[in-house]
């Protein structure tokens, strides 16, 4: 009897051991399947777009210093900023606003600079705007950095004729008064600007309109903003006003030739619009809420996409996230109307979260423009007189260049939680793509401020991949940033904490980091 008991015990113990071992094999808390053979959508490079508004020192001082400046420049445009921006291959730049766009009369910004009238920038700090940076200067800047221009027309305080003439001035080759005016101002050939927004935030600073009123205006403006191949973008409602979205989509249904894009803005405020924290002084509570509020973007996008799928099942209208990013309090001692903030590891991590979300919704998201390019909100570049720094967000954009116009690879992700004070968030975000040369790029981000994650990635359906390299953006402290006159604390470093065997990629993903792994045959 005792022998039987002993045998049963041994048997039971073995089965328990083998069950536990089997469980451990299948129980991978951080697991991603990259479906390498199921890619059908292209991640538009315009998802990696930018926004330059006449706001604070974005344009003046940041991009444009004028030809007489001691700061080295090309026709007034800073050489150091141009060289830096080229490193991230900026695909498209939205201009002149923002709220500024609906106060901007483009004819104030053409012709000899000395003869251009000054206006007051009533949205941003009440400063005098001398209009020295106008249409020609903006399009010159786009040519210098190799980006497509995206112009926002004034619907709030402008006229249909003004918008129509702007398109004609910029794009027409026919003999016409606007073409002649452009040539007189020194530009022989048209620029052929494809992307045009019809107003900005028309629910608010762009005219405080109702969705019905705006949609009627939209149809009027876009009827006369003519030209072959023009891509016209309607203003979205305030977040999360889905009724606005539905109204615009429904009322333009019979006018599909007039609308190519629908705009949507979303900002991360740490604890809400009225409770923004400082960009560099924050605790884990602030960090957690910044991540949480950034992840809301996914839900917002998906609800917009559901409506667009209903009203535009052919997927002809692109979702254009033409303002996004972190909005913190301004740096001490700076003009509150200039929205100047520093940029830390926290910004790098949320930039990666946003970009992964956009990548993974590339079927509908055709453009996104981070706010803003230089010296404003979540900027790529900060300048102080003749000095310049590249921000952590800049380095994420540089690292993610590999996804421009690549084929999106669908992923399935399961991960454990990042827990804080009884709340949880998924700790990992990811996106993957295949470049035209066949290389696969997997981008990962660990939002946990303290803990590393071991991640196993099944590169399913891919050829045997053996050549690999990795890059990481992180820093020892979550609020590390790059400052003027100091060595950089946050930039792209080589990353080696991974291995690949039989198309299984194992990554030891550090806390608060953004990583991209490149895999080749
Ligand atoms: O990016 C700053 C401002 O935020 C823009 O001018 C406006 O469109 C938005 O509310």
Image (spheres, rainbow, N blue to C red):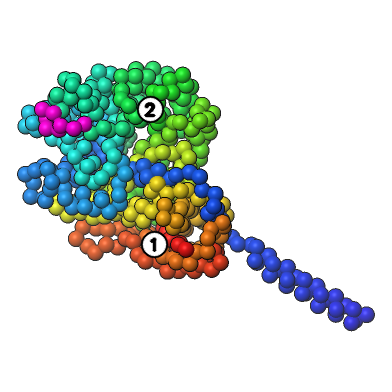
Question: Pointer 2 and pointer 1: residues touching (CB < 8 Å)?
Answer: no
| Mark 1 residue element | strand
Q: Position of residue 212 (x, y in %)?
A: 42, 18
Residue shown at 39% from the left, 17% from the top: 216
| Mark 2 residue element | strand
Q: Is residue 408 left or right of residue 223?
A: right
Can residue 269 be spotted in the picture? no
Where 435 sits versus 489, above or below?
above
Main SS of the magenta part reads: loop
Q: Which mark is residue 234?
A: 2
Where 389 sits versus 49, above or below?
below
Q: Position of residue 471 (x, y in %)?
A: 39, 62
Q: Which of the pair 331/135 is nearer the observer?
A: 135
Can residue 514 be spotted in the picture? yes
Boundaries of the magenta span:
183-190
Which quarter of the frame holds ligand 1? top left
Task: Single out the residue that lies furthest toward the right.
Answer: 1
The answer to which quarter of the image holds residue 477 is bottom left
Residue shown at 11% from the left, 50% from the top: 71
Specify whether tag 2 is near ligand 1 (CB below 8 Å): no
Q: Which residue is mark 1?
A: 472
Is residue 187 rendered magenta in the image?
Answer: yes
Specify whether tag 1 is near ligand 1 (CB below 8 Å): no
Where 185 sits versus 162, above or below?
below
Q: Position of residue 483 (x, y in %)?
A: 24, 58
Tell which circle, 2 or 1, labels the residue nearer the N-terminal end. Answer: 2
Question: Could you give the CA–CA distance between mark 2 and mark 1, rounded to whole angstroms?
Answer: 37 Å
**Quadrant including the N terminus:** bottom right
């Amino acid at each position: 009897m005792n022998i039987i008991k002993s045998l049963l015990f041994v048997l039971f113990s073995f089965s328990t051991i083998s069950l536990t071992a089997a469980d451990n094999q299948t129980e991978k808390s951080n697991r991603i399947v990259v479906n390498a053979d199921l890619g059908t959508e292209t991640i538009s490079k315009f998802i990696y777009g930018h926004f330059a508004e006449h706001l604070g020192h974005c344009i003046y001082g940041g991009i444009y210093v004028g030809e007489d400046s001691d700061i080295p420049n090309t026709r007034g445009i800073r050489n150091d900023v141009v060289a830096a921006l080229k490193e991230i291959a900026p695909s498209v730049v939205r201009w002149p606003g923002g709220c500024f766009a609906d106060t901007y009369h483009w004819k104030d910004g053409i012709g000899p600079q000395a003869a251009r009238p000054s206006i007051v920038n009533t949205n941003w700090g009440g400063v005098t705007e001398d209009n020295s940076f106008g249409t020609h200067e903006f399009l010159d800047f786009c040519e210098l950095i190799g980006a497509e221009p995206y112009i926002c027309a004034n619907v709030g305080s402008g006229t249909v004729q003004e918008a129509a003439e702007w398109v004609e001035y910029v794009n027409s080759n026919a003999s016409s008064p606007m073409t002649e005016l452009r040539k007189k101002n020194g530009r022989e050939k048209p620029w052929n600007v494809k992307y045009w927004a019809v107003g900005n935030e028309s629910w608010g600073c762009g005219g405080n309109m109702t969705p019905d009123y705006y949609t009627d205006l939209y149809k009027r403006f876009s009827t006369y903003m003519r030209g072959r191949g023009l891509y016209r973008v309607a203003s979205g409602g305030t977040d999360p006003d889905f009724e606005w979205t539905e109204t615009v989509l429904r009322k333009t249904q019979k006018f599909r030739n007039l609308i190519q894009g629908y705009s949507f803005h979303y900002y991360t405020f740490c604890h809400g619009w009225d409770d923004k924290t400082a960009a560099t002084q924050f605790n884990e509570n602030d960090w957690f809420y910044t991540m949480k509020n950034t992840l809301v973007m996914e839900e917002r996008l998906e609800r917009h996409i559901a409506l667009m799928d209903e009203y535009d099942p052919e997927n002809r209208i692109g979702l254009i996230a033409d303002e996004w990013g972190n909005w913190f309090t301004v740096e001490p001692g700076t003009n509150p109307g200039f929205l100047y903030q520093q940029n830390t590891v926290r910004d790098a991590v949320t930039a990666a979260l946003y970009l992964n979300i956009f990548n993974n919704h590339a079927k509908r998201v055709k453009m996104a423009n981070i706010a803003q390019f230089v010296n404003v909100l979540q900027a790529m570049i900060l300048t102080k007189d003749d000095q310049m720094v590249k921000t952590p967000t800049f380095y994420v954009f540089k690292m993610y260049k590999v996804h421009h116009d690549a084929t999106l690879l669908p992923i399935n992700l399961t991960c454990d939680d990042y827990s804080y004070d009884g709340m949880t968030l998924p700790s990992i975000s990811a996106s993957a793509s295949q470049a035209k040369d066949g290389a696969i790029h997997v981008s990962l981000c660990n939002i946990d401020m303290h803990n590393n994650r071991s991640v196993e990635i099944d590169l399913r359906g891919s050829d045997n991949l053996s050549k690999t390299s990795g890059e990481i953006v992180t820093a020892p402290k979550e609020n590390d940033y790059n400052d003027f006159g100091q060595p950089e604390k946050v930039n792209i470093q080589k990353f080696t904490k991974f291995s690949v065997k039989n198309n299984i990629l194992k990554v030891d993903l550090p806390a608060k980091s953004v990583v991209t792994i490149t895999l080749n045959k």
